[in-house]
Image (cartoon, rainbow, N blue to C red):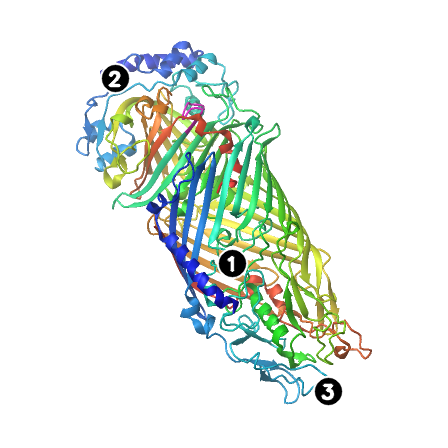
Amino acid sequence: METKLNTGRRLTLIAAALSATFATQAWGNDLPSMGEESSPWQVDVTYENHTVHREHAGLAKFRNTLQAELDKKVGDGWGIHSILRGSWDGVYRMNSSEYGKDAGGPIMLENISGVGGSFSVPHGGGVVNNATFPIPTNAFGFNLTANPNEGMRVLGDRWHATEGGVAFGVPVRPCDVDSRGCRDFGGYGKDGINGLEAPEFNKRFDFIRELYAKKTFNLADGKDLFLKVGKQQVVWGRTDLFRVLDVINPVDYSRNNIYDELSDIRIPMWIIQAEYRMGASDWMQDRNFQLVWNVDQFRANNLGQCGTPNVILDAGCFFRGMANLWDNGGTVANFAGGALATDFGPHQLGIRNVNLPAWSLSNTQLGAKYEGVTMNGLSFSLNALHYRSQLPSLHAFNYSPGELTNPADGSTTTVAKKMIAFDMHFPTVNLLGGSMDFQLPSVGAAVRMEGAMTWGEEFANSMRDELYSKNKVFRSVIGFDRPTFIPFISETSATLISAQLFYQHIFNHETQDAPFGKIGMVDWKDNFIGTLLIKGFLRNGTLSPQIIFAHDFQAQATAVAPQVEWNVSNDLKVTLGANYKLAEGRDRWKFDDCRACAPYTQFSYDPAGTVGANYGMTGMEPLGRFRAGPIGAAFKENDIFVRLNYKF
Amino acid sequence: MKKTMISLLPVVAAGLVGSAFAATEADVENTFNPYKAGMPSAPGVTPGTVITKANVDQFKDVLSVGLFKLLKDGAFEMKVGPTTQFMINSSYINATKANLNKTKLGSKAGENLTGYVAGRPFPEEPDAKDPRAGEKLAWNYKYGVNWGDGAVISPFYWRYRNMTTGQIEKTIKYDFHFLNFMHRTKDAPIPEFTPNPSGLYRAIYVKANEPQDLKNTQLLIQRFEDDSKLDDAYLYLGFQRRVRRLAQGQVTDSFLGSDLMIEDFEGYNGRVSDMKWNYKGTKNMLLPMWNHDELKLSDEFKEADGYKFVNYGGQGGCFPDATWQLRKVYVLEAVPVNPNHPISKRTFYMDAQLQNLNGAIDIYDRKGELWKAFSVGKSHPDHHLPVNKGSGIGIDDGVIMVDVQAKHCTTAQFKGQVDPKKAPPGLFQVQNLRGGD
């Protein structure tokens, strides 16, 4: 209902923005003047069409983007910079059976044991239900009229079969067509078709991608104070793809998963940035101290709404399915006894609340960086940041009198342990880190390094009653860039070879062997991800073939992304490309799903009825996505694409 | 020919003396005013002469190898103008006098100078018998007046052209800023900026403003006083918003797809110690030097102050529509020390008066075949923008870089401004790249 009310406003905003961005350079002179020492507005307008075809799914993107970049000097040394961006993705109408109003359908869920052996049941047809459970006051079962078996897909079917694990139905249609499980998970998750196809036109005015004022104040002794105030991106660190220090702005993975430049998918925030540029000293060639105060209301990473083409880690589908389970109940495959499809009722399991931090002074985020160049040419930074995690953490709340219901006896006052009923939180995190780069003349390479330690991040942990734990994390990246003459690519231009190795270590990592499998923290204690970019430059750089490999060592998943970029003219660029994923040993991703947890005495596996035990049954859902990583969880999403960029 | 020989006699004599004895005030006068005894001459080369495919053979001796080939191929016609004085500013000349004979070469090629303070370190005429004469000229270039203590080229239009079809493949609009941190002779602070713990000698800061895909791309090159230290080079990619330190190999690679590598900037943008320098003799040759305000200029790019850029024509639009003049040049060969360098040799035809390296250059590929012909045309500063009047600096005005193998060229049209206010030191720090847009 809320979405429908917004539609008219959204369309008005779209019309206003498109009419603005269609204007060209000449139009820039008609913008209002802003001071005697000012310069005219400089306006650059670009158009992009990005069309993607996905194996087994068909059209996965037909996005048209208009972007206007505006610059103006407004006098007294101040300058204004703005980027306006509006896009419209036709995929939701052009491939509506996959991503639009006709997506999904009735589903069947696994039931691997019981009378009649292994078979499937429809959503709403669980073997364990209100009628079959022996306790008369049980609360199993749900209203199939409120939660019908239509417009659904089985959780995780985009990247794995159920294979004896747990699964449930996930509504996949846009939220104006089907509102089940729709929540604001932090800037995504409740959009109707208009919001999905034109994502910038939302309540946060994302079509104003950047808008800031900047000025350099000349101080005594040649020192400067640089101020930049407004909606902006603040980029820390020296590496590509990996976000070790580059965590000030959240990221919109719904735009193109991990395959867009970060500058196109960082979500700009309202930030005050001040930089004291001290220049050289007797020991340092350059010294700068930066303060970054993110005064904007919190935003999370956009992980993609379920039912859309880019749902990183398939997390948005897990969240939507779980929210629907909480609201309406539903059938869960292979659950009771680890084998029986079970019809849960509302308020028994799922995701209840999303606790997005409201705006308050104490919720603003603060960073500081000292960056310098030593007299020997080592360029380095020291970084500190107090921020909110942009990834959600699910806390099992275990007790909510009058609300959280024990399905076995219908009680709403029982205190549970390890109950898979969650509230979503975004914890406070503190980060200390640094970066540096230097040359290695002996091998003709430049080296980039980043490292950071965080305190306060939270991870799924099925050994804890709240099903999460806080852990310190260390992350680092080392990168090598080396231009190399590869004659078969070009005899006149060097080919850039750029390799990076990312490492993550989780401190106080907890796992334990339980009777049916391992329990504890699903994230790998130590993991490495490597990337390799090979980029050639042909025909005076107008033709640039490249290939990127990315390999997640623990997930044993690989992405290969070849592309050719052709600058047809100064104003027109065409890019053809693909990305293809490979994944070996997918059983490695399976992990404890807490179906053998004992939140209440009735579900205890031991005769004493101990609550809180976990016997450790495993499956791909819900936690396998953390082991598969963004490459493994998308391994069935092989794309080819064409992208056209034109500057007016 | 006889006349030429006679006019060069005092020069040769001065060179011989210079090799045997310390440089004198006369050497200083001669190096900054090589035309005191008269302008150079060569048979048939007179103002108004037009060298074409038909008559180029008779001018072979006054042309670089690359330019001769291009003329022979009919790629353009060369109009000859009068030889004019390009007097360097008095502060640099005075610094040369004040520090005469203080500079000593290192004990072997590749080692740093000692005793250098300011001005032209080796004002004496090069001597063919001096095995290190080439190296001395290279040092003269490194510490040459070049763009002075601080200057900017803004804007700087750089174009990639298909010589065969005439298609303009790309136009990039840059700003190029230059700053000397040390050995300054004209603009405060003199002689250097302090503190300067790394010993930065000079830096170039480049910012691309157009086209959209390169907008905000920035390049910073820092050269050190210690010639054994590698340059530091940083690239800020606007589309990535990240500063990347460039590996050494990237300065010898095509810069943003052009026919130039970073090492080609200003004629030669590397360390003295990166090359083996050989002085091959002194000649009179045609170099692209003119009075900007006397040229037929382009109406293509509009500037608010009415400034117009050098017009381009000839095959593929690769050549400036400007005049060339006979100059006294030192022929200087530079062979890369690094055997993996993408070129095998450059031959510089160094203007003896300015001692820049970019008048005419032949660049040879790894197989030893002519690869590129490179020239940077200069205007007399008093015939350029008002801000340049009296600067005593040859104003780089237009570039020809022709890949004779690929039939492709890169041209550049400049609005050079010798204005130290537009080259503040803060612009040449890495943080300036990060703190921009």
Q: Chain of mark 1?
A: A
Indicate the secondary structure of the residue bearing disc 1: loop
**Percent x, y of residue A112:** 63, 82
Which residue ends up furthest to the top in the rendered image? B25
In this figure, what is the number of numbered marks?
A: 3
**Percent x, y of residue B47:** 21, 22
Q: Is residue A523 above or below residue B373?
A: below
In the rendered view, does B306 fall on the left or right side of A71?
left
Indicate the secondary structure of the residue bearing disc 3: loop
What residue is shown with label 2? Answer: B4
Q: Residue at x 50, y 76 (%)?
A: A104
In the image, B116 versus A308, the foreground residue is A308
In the rendered view, does A22 fall on the left or right side of B298?
right
Magenta residues, start to end:
B143-151
A336 inside magenta stretch: no
Disc 3 to disc 2: CB gap under 8 Å? no
**Percent x, y of residue B270:** 45, 32
Name which quarter of the figure residue A412 lies in. bottom right
Q: Which mark identifies residue A203?
A: 1
Marks 3 and 2 sit apart, C-alpha to C-alpha, by 117 Å
Marks 2 and 1 sit apart, C-alpha to C-alpha, by 80 Å
Q: Chain of mark 2?
A: B
Dots 3 and 2 on the same chain? no
Structural crowding at the residue carrying mark 1, measured as other residues with C-alpha within 10 Å and reported as few (<14), some (14–19) or many (≥20): few
In the image, A363 versus B97, the foreground residue is A363
The numbered mark, 1 or 3, whose residue comes first in the sequence reads 3
Q: Chain of mark 3?
A: A
Q: Amino acid at mark 1?
A: Lys
Structural crowding at the residue carrying mark 3, measured as other residues with C-alpha within 10 Å and reported as few (<14), some (14–19) or many (≥20): few
Visible residue check, residue A576: no
